[in-house]
Image: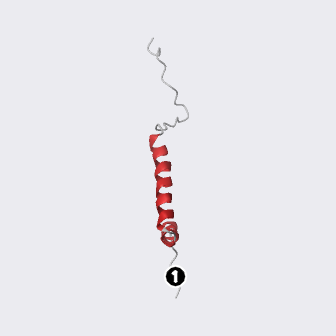
Amino acid sequence: MARRKESLLEVLMEIAAKLPWQVGLALAFVAYLIFHHFALLPPHHPRFPGQQRPRPHAGR
C-alpha cells in the first residue's frame, strides 16, 4: 500500500519530534527572534509603473 505524500510541515514536525526538548526550545526561540524582526519592519508599499511620489507643491 502506497503512503500518501507528506507535506513539508508534517516532515518538519516529525523531525522536531525526534529532537531533544532543549533543541526544540532553542529552535522556538530562534524562530521567535526571526519573526519578531520581520514584524518590526515598516510596511513595503510597492510602486506600480506610472505611479509617482506625490509632490508637496503639486497644487501650485
Local SS, label 1: loop
The residue lying furthest to the right in this view is 49
The residue lying furthest to the top in this view is 60
Q: How many marks?
A: 1
In depth, the one of 38 and 21 nearer the eye is 21
**Vertical side of 38 occupied by 20: above or below:** below
Residue at image location 53% in from the left, 36% down from the top: 48
How crowded is the residue under tag 1: few (<14 C-alpha within 10 Å), some, or many (20+)? few
- Quarter of the picture containing the C terminus is top left
Residue 4 is situated, as x and y percent measured from the top left of the image, at 50, 79
Residue at image location 51% in from the left, 63% down from the top: 23
**Vertical side of 51 occupied by 35: above or below:** below
**Mark 1: which amino acid?**
Arg
Residue at image location 45% in from the left, 44% down from the top: 39
Q: Mark 1 highlights which residue? A: 3
Residue 58 is situated, as x and y percent measured from the top left of the image, at 47, 16
In depth, the one of 18 and 14 nearer the eye is 18
How are the residues colored?
A: secondary structure
In depth, the one of 35 and 44 nearer the eye is 35
Residue 10 is situated, as x and y percent measured from the top left of the image, at 48, 70
The residue lying furthest to the bottom in this view is 1
